[in-house]
Amino acid sequence: MRVMPNMRDTSAPAIGSVILNWNSGAFAAEAARSVLQAGGPSRSVLIVDNGSIDNSADFLEAKLPECEILRAGRNLGFAEGCNEGIRLFLSRGAEFVLLLNADAWIAPDALERLLDAMAAPAPGAARIAAAGARVLFAGAPDRIESVGAWLSPSTGRIYHRGHGKTGLDMPGILFPDAVSGCAMLLRAEALRDVGGFDPALFCYFEDVDWCLRARERGWGVATAAQARVWHWGSASSGGRISPARLYYSTRNQLRVWETRFPLERRAALWARRGAILALWTAFALASSGMPTSAALREIRSGWRDFLAGRYGERR
């Protein structure tokens, strides 16, 4: 593993950028280049290779001598893979940590826009812990994928403002309940207070869970609506909605809602559980492209493991 200079040596806000790679070396290289070429404060880029089997780590070391490659040796999942990078940058004195998906890239001014959001007054909170971006579809570069998520504690519904739309006029800064881990800037002080992502989730909903935990501790969450990021989506699964996504999303949303939005009345609890299962079933039938029986099998597996308390990587 290459050693980067200590980040305390700069007077500008030091940003440690973590890109998690799993068999997507060419994508990860473009993501890293976009961060290195962006304007704004000093930053260092760490690519955490999550046990790739396609020689991604060797490829990235050869292509990006200015970046550091951390070889995890196995697939730690998104949550713990990001935690590895977060811990390293916190130990080096980074003021902020940028998480960027391997299959995404940022606009030249995105870091400055994200930092502007970090400095914004947060309604009902002392300071902003996490700033998300205006995530756009790479295949339709003006179309919105996410500007954050607004959550229903009682029904499990997740509202993505502007999803799939183009040309929306938005305020410069929004205040959703959670922002996408595809591209999120985290304040180091908040990370020390809240902790990292929950490894039990492995992948999917770890970003939502972290934002909710931060809000519980008095921090704010914001979206820099003019910080543009383009995202291919599911690059490691060839762009498809994978069986793993259905399994982990079902299991993890149930866990996050029950831990962050507890309900005392059993009738309300079971109604919400049923609503979440119905939402994922509808999504699978409409969007996955999988045979119906296979999609329903993944959702049932996620439900069963949730009930059994089986978390972490699927076994």
Image: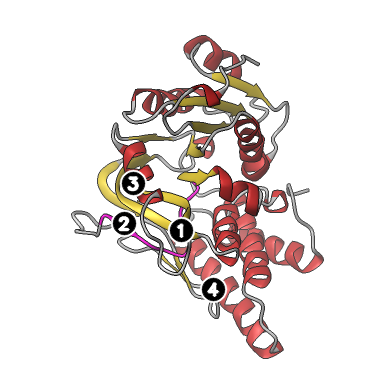
Please check the rendered image and state whether residue 108 is part of the magenta-colored stretch, yes or no.
no
Q: Is residue 269 above or below residue 240?
A: below
Mark 2, Cα crowd under 10 Å, few <14 / some 14-19 / many 20+, is: many
Q: Which residue is mark 4?
A: 156
Q: Secondary structure at mark 3?
A: helix
Pick whichever of labels 4 and 2 is earlier in the sequence.
Answer: 4
Mark 3, Cα crowd under 10 Å, few <14 / some 14-19 / many 20+, is: some
**Residue 264 figure quarter:** bottom right
Give, as a three-letter code, the residue at label 1: Val
Q: Which residues are magenta?
A: 172-181
Q: Secondary structure at mark 2?
A: strand
Pick whichever of labels 4 and 3 is earlier in the sequence.
Answer: 3
Left or right: 245, with 285 as reference point: right
User: Looking at the picture, how far across and down is residue 164, in whole percent?
Assistant: 30, 57
**Residue 61 figure quarter:** top right
Pick whichever of labels 3 and 1 is earlier in the sequence.
Answer: 3
